[in-house]
Image (cartoon, grey):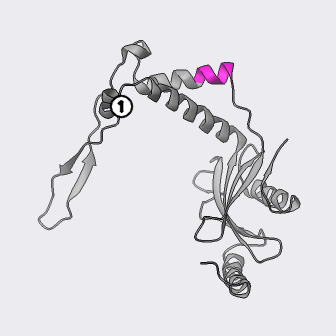
Amino acid sequence: MELPRHKRRNAVIRLGWKIARQTDAHGFWTDQLLEDPDDPDRIHRWVDVYFLSADRFTLWNAEFITIPLAVEDALHKRAFEAAYAGLSAEEIEREFAFESRTVPRKRPGEPRMFEWVQRPQGHYPQFEGRTFQQECERLEAHYLATEPPVIGERFVTDRGYAYGIGLHAVVDEATLDRAAIERTIQRFRDIGERDWHAA
C-alpha cells in the first residue's frame, strides 16, 4: 500500500534529517566505507547509496556499478549460461549439489553448526577435460576477445522496493569514490530522475 503524499513526504523528511546528521553536505548515505584508513588504495566498483530526490519527496534506494564491472558481469553471465547448457541433467545435479556436514561441538550446549563440504571438481569431455569453472573462464576470455558486450551508462528505476524507489545505475566512472557518487547523483537529477540509457 502506498502512503499518501503528505505522509510520504514526512517519512522522507525524517530520513533526510537522519542522512543529514550522519553525513556532511554530500547529500547521500551509504554504509560502505568509502575512505578506509586501513586500506587507502581500496577501489569501489559498486556501491549502495540512499539519497533524496531534488524535490525532497522521494527516497532513492540506489545501486551504482561502474561500466567495467557491468561488462565483467555480462561476460560472466553469458559464459556461465553457455557452459551450463553444455552439461547434461546428471552433470548439473552432480556439479551443483550442496553437501554439508555437522561441525563437532566443543562444549555441550553450543549451537549446532554446519560447514559446506567442498567436493572435487569434475572434468568434462565436452569441455576438452576442463572443469566447469575453467570452461567459464575460457568462454569469458573468448567473448571478451571476439564479441565484447557494449554497455553504456544507464539509469533504471524499480518501484518494487519496500523502502524508497529502487534505482539501478551503470555509471561512466572508473571507480566510485565520494566525488564520483556525487557526480552520478547530479547526472541523474539533470536527466529528470527517470529511466535513461546512453545512446
Q: Residue at x 60, y 71 (%)?
A: 163
Q: Which image quarter is the C terminus in?
A: top right
* Horizontal and vertical percent position of residue 153: 78, 45
Q: Count numbered badges in the picture.
A: 1
* Horizontal and vertical percent position of residue 142: 60, 19
* Horizontal and vertical percent position of residue 100: 24, 46
Q: Which image quarter is the N terminus in?
A: bottom right
Q: Residue at x 72, y 41 (%)?
A: 67
Which residue type carries mark 1?
Answer: Ile
Q: Residue at x 64, y 55 (%)?
A: 47
Magenta includes 167? no
For label 1, the SS is: helix
Q: Is residue 48 left or right of residue 139?
A: right
Q: Which residue is identified by label 1?
A: 92
Q: Is residue 134 left or right of residue 64?
A: left
* Horizontal and vertical percent position of residue 170: 72, 48
Of residues 14 and 3, the one drawn nearer to the viewer in this rendering: 3
- Among the 4 quarters of the image, the one containing residue 28: bottom right
Which secondary structure class fits the magenta region best? helix
Write the start and end of the magenta stretch as one range. 141-147
Placement of 36 over or under 75, stated as above or below: below
Residue 174 seen:
yes
